Amino acid sequence: WLYREGLQDSGALPNSEPGESEALQRSTLHVSVSQLDESSVNQISAATGVSVAESCDVACEVGVKILPESKLALLEAALLYERSKLSSIGYCSHGVVMGDWLKVPHSPLAGDGFSFHLPLHRALARSIRCYCSAVVPTQERVQSPDRWWRLPLLDDDDDFASSDVSVSGFIFKQDNLSALVRPTHKSANLRVMWSSGPDCSPPEAQLRRSRSRMMSNLLASTKVIHSLCDHPLRCIAAAQQIDHHMWARNGSSLGGMALNYGSVPLCRSLRDLDLTMVQLSACGFNVGLGSRRVFGLLTNRFSMDGYLCDPDRRVPGNSYVRPGWVKPPRMQDPEHAELLAESFFTTVCIIVSDLPPPPPSSLNDDSVLRHSLRRELLHALAVEPRSHSEAMAAASTAVSRRDESDSGTVGIDGGSSFRAVFTEVLQSIAQQRNQGSRASSGPPLFELKPDSSNEYDPSFYHLRRTEHQHAMDNIARLRKQKLAILSKGTNSDMVLPLVSEPPVCHPRFLPSRLLLHLPPMYAAIRRYLMYALFDGSWLPPPAPEPVKPADTDAIGADAMLTVSFPGSNTSMTARREAYHRATSSMSNVS
């Protein structure tokens, strides 16, 4: 399910139809010389002696890609252009190479296949989360503030963005991921038709092999980085579509898969790890697409292209094109657009909110465990009161099995155990419910305190839609109680927050919150607010017709109704009738 190189030659998926394998591996790299600067093109042309092609379209689903040397020179010029930009900025983490030119169309609603089974992606996400929870002493944070939060191997610095070039003037540098990917794919994935023919000297043959392998490795690493975000995002979008009954023809089995995918406790091994991969990619660095590309991928995978953006006006180029607003793409059901937009914004809220927590500073530091337990337990009690055992089962979603056991301790030599921390958190945010004189024989129940109602998050991802509806009703009731307690009978006004402050996250994942500050995100919010304001219309309303109000000089006394204005044959009676008609039409417009 990765974008495997050599699919046709290696015999992978032997029982699949050609159309099916094309849908699984479909991706294309588009590079145009108009996107590059003149210096990069001239430098590559002078070094290779070949004129750079105008454009290059590499179909990545084909096992072996054959292209002329002029297109290879164009790809090398694109690499030089990216390297020159990065070297001028001075970033050590350069991001995905040629990420803006890789296009991977995919739409499950249109018939493209996908799978909920992504063991390699989730194994990597589990390893990253485990490393982020490792202890980082305070002294190490102070001594190396710009390095202690980095991921090993994935965030290591390389010299891809440096200005050094080889003697021949070519770029033979690879990023760290290309060096890792190189042994895993075939060396003949990229075949070049050289302009000078097959006969060449041994140094020139070695140079040709180096150029071909370098480009093949870079293309493979680019597709791997894209797949680290794309495939988990496909599962997240498809699960949202299934929850909204857009896949009703697939039966109840698929609905059960989507339910297990996003519900506790299985979501810890499925959807939560997929969210980690999307968050990792949104951060950028060497193995991420960056917030801008991830936002574009989010919009595409939720089928919101043309919907969550600023509306475009059609420019009349000839007499056959009528001026007006460009309509968004038509969907199978008009109601799907609203449901998908809701799922889109919900997913964005989850991506920027529930990030991996910061690492502990020592073995006895249990602040991260306390915060995770508090957040999980608070939302569980916001839905309904729970017994002690039910509350502990709900809180265990936020911890690993080692912390959940009685013997597992957060620290050594008397560190706090999971049960001790859970008891303290439960006492701080909950109170035992008063069952009255007709108390049942069941266990005592704990309910949320009014003081903790402001910490409720309407987009908390471990609660389903129906549970959030119950939680919102309970939170509204608790906030009224809190307001009554604080006001103490006075009529003082108080503002209560709609959502809580986002939790503290690991510094490595903090750049993923740049999704909220992109101009396309502002455009998406404007478009959806316009949709809600104008009664479910994705297009702006037509401009109101200008109404010319009548002359209001004659609104005075009735004695002036028969007076005529100088130079005019219209009496005041006619002007009064015109005024009444104008006000009537204005009221209809309003």
Image: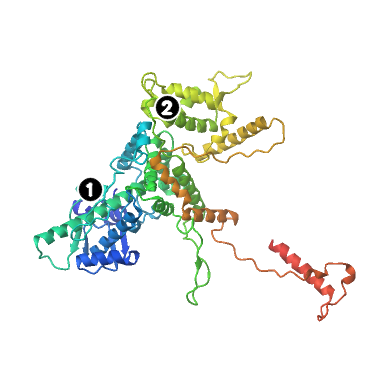
Q: How many marks?
A: 2
Give the residue furthest to the front.
143
Residue 101 shown left or right of residue 252 in the figure: left
Q: Name the residue nearer the viewer: 273 or 96.
A: 96
Disc 2 to disc 1: CB gap under 8 Å: no
Give above or below for 368 relative to 281: above
What amino acid is at disc 2?
Asp
Q: Nearer the viewer, residue 96 or 184?
A: 96
Residue 271 in view (yes/no)? no
Disc 1 marks which residue? 179
Q: Tell me where residue 517 appears, x and y as whole percent.
A: 47, 50
Crowding at dot 2, Cα within 10 Å, few <14 / some 14-19 / many 20+, comes out as: some
Please name the residue that numbered disc 2 is placed on: 366
SS under mark 2: loop
Q: Amino acid at mark 1?
A: Ala
- Asked whether 436 or 272 is in front, the reply is 272
- Tell me, yes or no, if residue 468 can be seen here: yes
